[in-house]
Image (cartoon, rainbow, N blue to C red):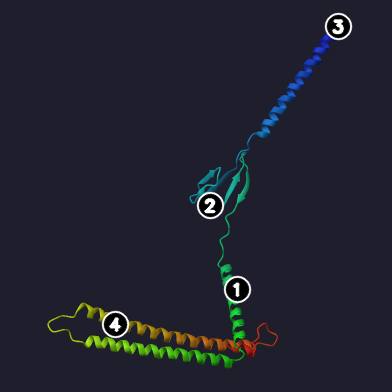
Amino acid sequence: MGSLMCDRQLRRWHFRATSLAATALFQFWFLGLASAPAHANTFCCQDASGRSLCSDQLPRECYGKAYREIDGRGITVRRHQPAAPATAEAPGREAEERARKDRARRDQMLLQSYANEGEIDHLRDRRLREMADKLRIAEEQHREALKHQQKLAAQPPRPGKSASTDASAASASAQDAVRERAKSIEAIKQETERMRIQFDDDKRRYRELTAQPAGGSLAPASSSSRP
């Protein structure tokens, strides 16, 4: 009887020990599986010749092209399409919007600067008179430079000697002065014409703005804002 009980007790201990060992083995396997690093995805695309290119990092040849990501089981998990090229319409619209805002700003300044068309004419005439005075002074300086150049050219060289170095330098300097005065005259004429055109444009635009229906966002300046 005692032998039978001992045998049963041994079998229970053996079963318990086996169960504990199996449980520990399962836990060890599960933890090891959970802690094992996952396989990195693979990136694949096709080059210009249709050849497939794959790597654990996106190959340089795939930049800007469609490519796909493949997981460690060989299954495609994601597909990437190249970004659509920017159209020329967006920059064009932005440029138009900037031009519209710039025009509105200049219109506002125009209306704030003049109370009527007469003020535009008054300022134009005054500025043109100033430019005419500058032109007269520049032309007088040009005539003086020409006289000086002609005087140097008319001086005869010393008997038996060629023109000295100092005389040559003076002649070259006189020529430079004549050229500079001529350039100044041309610049003043160009500036005068540009100013005339600008005032004509301002006057025409002022008429367009002041002809707008009442209640518009733009309004002429008061008479106290005379430039």
In the depicted view, which residue is nearer to us: 66 or 138?
Answer: 138
Q: CA distance from mark 4 to mark 1?
A: 51 Å
9 with respect to 138 (left or right)? right
Residue drawn at the location 67% of the way across and 32% of the way down: 33
Tag 3–tag 4 contact (CB < 8 Å): no
Q: Which mark is residue 5?
A: none
Q: Amino acid at mark 2?
A: Tyr
Say above or below: 148 vs 1: below
Earlier along the polypeptide chain: callout 3 or callout 1? 3
Q: CA distance from mark 3 to mark 1?
A: 105 Å
Q: Which residue is mark 1?
A: 97
Q: Nearer the viewer, mark 3 or mark 4?
A: 4
Residue 30, horizontal then vertical, whole percent: 70, 31
- How packed mark 4 is, by other alpha carbons closer than 10 Å (few <14, some 14-19, many 20 or more), is some
Q: CA distance from mark 2 to mark 4?
A: 63 Å
In the depicted view, which residue is nearer to us: 157 or 107?
Answer: 157
Tag 2–tag 4 contact (CB < 8 Å): no
Earlier along the polypeptide chain: callout 4 or callout 1? 1
Q: Which mark is residue 63?
A: 2
Q: Amino acid at mark 3?
A: Gly
Residue 200, horizontal then vertical, whole percent: 52, 89
Q: Which mark is residue 175?
A: 4
Q: CA distance from mark 2 to mark 3?
A: 82 Å
Kind of element beneath mark 2? loop
Locate the C terminus by quadrant: bottom right
Say above or below: 168 vs 23: below
Tag 2–tag 3 contact (CB < 8 Å): no
Residue drawn at the location 28% of the way across and 87% of the way down: 148
